[in-house]
Amino acid sequence: ARMKNKKNKKKKNKSAKLKSKNAAADEQDAHQSTLSRPPVVTILGHVNHGKTTLLDALRGGSTAANEAGNITQHVSAFLVERPTGETLTFLDTPGHAAFAGIRQRGAKATDVAVLVVAADEGVQEQTKEAITYLTDDNVPMVVAFTKVDKRSANVARCSQQLTMWGVFVESTGGDVPSVEVCAHTKKGLDDLLDTILLFSEEADIKNNPDHMGEAVVLDCKHITGRGTVTTAVARWGHFQQGDNIVVADKVGKLRQVHVNGKMSSIVTASQPFEFTGVDDVKPGDYIFAVPNAQQARKIAHKRCVQKELHPELDAAMLSEGSSQHLYQKHDQEEQNRDEDEDEEDDPEADNARPQLRVILKADVHGSLEAIQHQLKLELEASLLEGEEQLPVDLTIISSALGSIGEADLRMANEFDAQIYGFDVPREAASKTAENVHEFKVLYSLVDHILEQMSRMLPPTRRHISVGSGEVLQAFEISVRRNVTIPVAGLRVERGVFHKKRNFEVAIKRDGQTLHVGPLASLKIHQEKVDQVGKGKECGLQVVGWDQPFLAGDVLECVEVVVDQTRKLGRDASAKQQHMQHQAFIKSRR
């Protein structure tokens, strides 16, 4: 027995040593197979600060000219190869406020960010937003001061403004590099690329080309004949045409792969690419290549179960740092998704309120997201002071990608809805339909919906105070047996009391409004008058008030203004709030 125990111990020691040698060898092989990869660079900044023009100068194209209104409304990704052989991947994001979700995903998918600041305008709203995204995700940044050729350019002022938001460029004693660039003259472009490459070397961005691929979805669109086409950027390993992939809780195969607009059978790390093979993909989802279809189905099923048990969790968002161990850790708790989806209301509910029903069709998922995000902001900003909800509802019956077809028309007729298409074609059946609206610029689409909702608004009644007074004495006049009418003996202390159709009197007692109604009678010394000014005494009766007045009651004369010109939207709402404030000030005078 002792001999057997000694033999067993020797075997265990040998196996332990062998395992440790194998682990060390595996670690050494993994280290040797890990190579540097090109950096993924995202361009962020305020609208019209020159982001797309800068990228066009880097790659020698004209992206903004192909966009409606010469503004960027889609995310784009492309490779830039230098004469010295280095390669960089650039992501361009829209600068308008509506595309906040796209910019945030761009910040999450990047290794180095270029914060574009126009030297003639300085730090603006979307600049501040971009700084927040980059700071939250600890993304290293390079500041590019654009439009330095303009007379009003002031780089020193812009640098000082950045310090107020925690960004200290090297010229102000900080460690954030900055470069002055001009896209038209190509000044500073080489310096910018050198700075980005230096950053990536210091960050030691690595990739294992032998590992199965990982990528992040940037956007997706529907193309007739190809189906759902997804745009993504590879982050680790490599993909091959035909790979089994998992995207959130969906499975599929990598098909029709395009890199830089050309068919390709292999995708390496940092390359932007397009592919088909998976439907219902959302921007921000992570893509993982797995060894076989059985493994993919197993992982997807697990995520579906987790989504049902925990609706607040989203199975698409795995931790990026541990994603290479997907097969061992696919049952871990997923991260909460950053973007919120608007809940669709029941189109048959609340019939008493006017309601605009719409069907949205767009070219890419990011456009749908931006439209709904902008509508939400505009409607929230349209609420007047003290208003909890708008008197008109907006119901999105459906939102989808692709062309406007016969199925959309049937749905629109069933729900009495309007169809809004953003940068999508119309099939033959929909070309003569009157309830179809096409747009190339996102803000024009949003403005049209707000205009339609404004037309459905019921007239609003506003009360503007024009006078007030205190009841000195209360009377009762007998008109017939057992019927009396209360009369107030009033001294006007402010403004004027009117007996006209569009004026009413509010009766207040102890700070509470008891009744509001028009004047039945207004007299001075038994003489009927149409108005009584400040400092005079009068007697009055109020229609609908049958309770005795009390000395000390406060009566307020208000002008009833029926407004049928209310417009929805942030600009219109701000103007209306200003008009109400001015009317209030005028009445107090």
Image (spheres, rainbow, N blue to C red):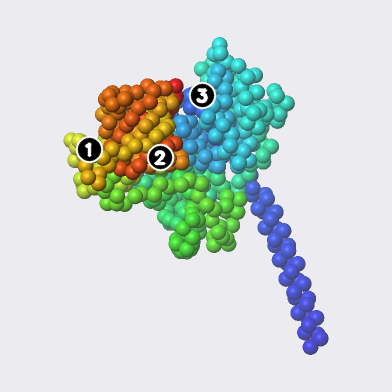
Image height of 213 relative to 87, above or below: below
Identified at 74% across, 69% down, the residue is: 16
Disc 3 is placed on an element classified as loop
Identified at 51% across, 17% down, the residue is: 184
**Where does the image place residue 295, in percent across and percent down from the top left?**
48, 62
Disc 1 and disc 2: Cα gap in Å?
A: 60 Å
**Where does the image place residue 342, in percent across and percent down from the top left?**
40, 46
Q: Residues within 10 Å of mark 3 (few under 14, many from 20)?
A: many
Disc 2 is placed on an element classified as loop
Q: Residues within 10 Å of mark 2 (few under 14, many from 20)?
A: some
Residues 270 and 139: in front is 139
Reading the image, the residue beneath label 1 is: 435
Reading the image, the residue beneath label 2 is: 550
Label at residue 78: none
Reading the image, the residue beneath label 3 is: 49
**Where does the image place residue 566, in percent across and percent down from the top left?**
33, 30
Q: Amino acid at mark 1?
A: Asn
Left-right relation of 428 to 149:
left
Of marks 1 and 2, which one's residue comes earlier in the chain?
1
Residues 195 and 446: in front is 446
The mark lying in front, picked from 1 and 3, is 1
Of marks 2 and 3, which one's residue comes earlier in the chain?
3
Identified at 47% across, 54% down, the residue is: 248
**Where does the image place residue 477, in percent across and percent down from the top left?**
28, 38
